[in-house]
Image: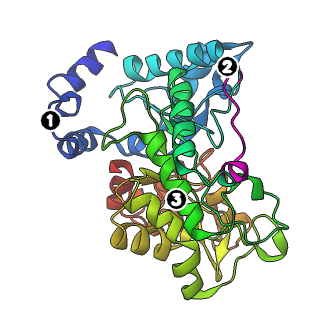
Amino acid sequence: MAQQRSRTRRGAAYLDRARDVDARVRDLLGRMTLQEKVRQMSIRLVSAFVKNGRVSAGAVRRFFGNLGIGCLQDLRSDPRTNVEAVNALQEYLVERTRLGIPALVVSECLHGHLSGGATVFPQAIALASTWSPELVRLMSEAAAREARAVGAAQAFAPDLDLAREPRWGRVEETYGEDPYLVSRMGVAYIRGMQGDGPAIDRDHLICTPKHYAAHGSPEAGINLAPVEGGMRLLRTVFLPPFKAAVTEAGALSIMPAYSEYDGIPASASKLLLTRVLRQEWGFRGYTFSDYGAVSMLHTFHKTARTPAEAGRQALEAGMDLEAPEDYGFGEQLIELVEKGEVSLDLIDRAVSR
């Protein structure tokens, strides 16, 4: 197995840091099997591989095998346990899988890195009350250093929902109701968390603004409930904070909302995920589903009759990664590609991003 890995990687352009990023991506994609590609479109919790505070080598081998994974979510425990677990998993991915692709380690960082021993800053609604984007930037810089120190590389933040429905139970995660204030705070947070770019260095993290879009104004204030408003309200009120996050701050990942807008779930919206995000705003990062959002196309929104159809709808709309486990992606997508019902080009598009 080690000899096979050595032959696969010998002289590989994707391992040459001196080469152009796009060229490295094309080279790596050309070497990947369909199974390896689809694994890059999913995430697993680090906790799934940890027993009694230590990584289970058997659990790691059984799941990863030779395929790897796209993302891992870090532990919400003490820093030492988190570092040891992340290091052990990354070592396996780099040294024991065929292509040696490390995972992106993601974490919650809404008001500080969510783990034991990390600094707890005020919630977002309190930060907004300062009216000080510079203070928010300083906070996100500090949170990024703490998260990066324990292995994280991507943050599920900031929350750019507008708190326009006071009965909604997640108002505290937001910067309030005003699109301008939310835009300024969001841009400041992303610039502090991601750094000056365009690449992410060792002291910063990829940002994942959420929940794209209009998630914070559900009917009757019920989380996940539909949002109604029409195109004018969407364009002039709900989208500006996300547009600023992409076009001004250069956010590298986006998390679509659970909810539907005017009858179309965000996770299956070609308008939101392709036309607006990529064609109009020029977004070049990748989309990361909220946890269970793809499955909800089948179980909650009822736009898909099967898990496989849910995966196809999300992928065709512009979703690149499904969380937290494979429901519509995974084996279902592999079968659809093999049957000719889903184009391999869509898989390659998502994996390349």
- The percent position of residue 311, horizontal first and vertical second, equals 54, 61
Q: Nearer the viewer, residue 175 or 247?
A: 175
Q: Nearer the N terminus, badge 2 or badge 1? A: 1
- The percent position of residue 304, horizontal first and vertical second, equals 63, 71
Binning the other alpha carbons within 10 Å of mark 1 as few (below 14), some (14 to 19) or many (20 upward) gives: few
Tell me the residue that label 2 is attached to.
50
Amino acid type at image mark 1: Arg
Amino acid type at image mark 2: Val
Cα–Cα span, label 1 and label 3: 36 Å
- The percent position of residue 14, horizontal first and vertical second, equals 22, 33
- Residue in the picture at 76% in, 53% down: 172
- Residue in the picture at 34% in, 72% down: 279
Q: Nearer the viewer, mark 2 or mark 1?
A: 1
Q: Please tell me whether residue 185 belongs to the stretch shown in magenta.
A: no
- The percent position of residue 114, horizontal first and vertical second, equals 67, 33
Tell me the residue that label 1 is attached to.
19
Q: Which residues are magenta?
A: 116-127
Q: Nearer the N terminus, badge 1 or badge 3? A: 1
Q: Nearer the viewer, residue 341 or 179?
A: 179
Amino acid type at image mark 3: Arg
Quarter where residue 100 is shown: top left
Binning the other alpha carbons within 10 Å of mark 3 as few (below 14), some (14 to 19) or many (20 upward) gives: many
